[in-house]
């Protein structure tokens, strides 16, 4: 079964932080979005990633989404039987 993306351009900044915590904060920062300490700007919490890119608060939305969705998958061997890496080899 193919993996379903957890994050999309319509995901909110708050969704990223709620699901990924510090890793989400780091990825947002790497793409130009600084949530700051305590994230006190309530309106920005509910800004979509797409809108953040349109208003130039965020760079490379496609790259960010790829990283976010990769980080949101369960680790290989972790409970659900699905993971981000494959251990199959072809000969």
Image (spheres, grey):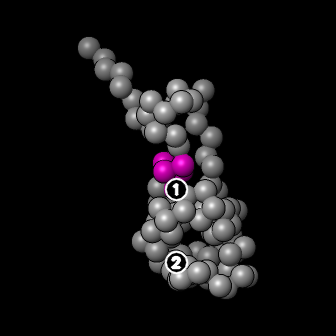
The reply to whether the magenta stretch includes residue 71 is yes
Main secondary structure of the magenta stretch: helix
Residue that carries the numbered disc 2 in the rendered image: 33
Pick whichever, 1 or 37, lies toward us: 37
Numbered-mark total = 2
Identify which residue is drawn at 49% across, 65% down.
22
Identify which residue is drawn at 47% across, 62% down.
23
Residue 21 - label: none
Of all residues, the one furthest to the bottom in this rendering is 41
Q: Is residue 74 above or below residue 21?
A: above
46 left or right of 22 in image: right
Residue 47: percent from the left, percent from the top?
A: 69, 74
Q: Is residue 54 visible?
A: no
Residue 20: percent from the left, percent from the top?
A: 55, 58
Residue 68 - label: 1
The reply to whether the magenta stretch includes residue 87 is no
Pick whichever, 47 or 18, lies toward us: 18
46 left or right of 74 in image: right
Q: Is residue 35 visible?
A: yes
Point out the stretch of residues depicted in magenta.
68-72
Q: Is residue 89 above or below residue 30?
A: above
Please tell me which of labels 1 and 2 falls first in the chain. Answer: 2
Q: Secondary structure at mark 2?
A: loop
Tell me the quarter of the image containing the C terminus: top left
């Amino acid at each position: 079964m193919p993996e379903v993306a957890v994050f999309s351009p319509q995901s909110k900044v708050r969704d990223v932080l709620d699901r990924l915590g510090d890793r989400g904060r780091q990825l947002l920062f790497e793409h130009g979005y600084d949530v700051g300490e305590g994230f006190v700007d309530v309106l920005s919490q509910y800004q979509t990633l797409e809108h953040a890119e349109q208003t130039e608060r965020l760079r490379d939305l496609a790259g960010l989404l790829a990283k976010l969705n990769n980080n949101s998958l369960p680790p290989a061997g972790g409970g659900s039987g699905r993971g981000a890496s494959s251990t199959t080899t072809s000969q």
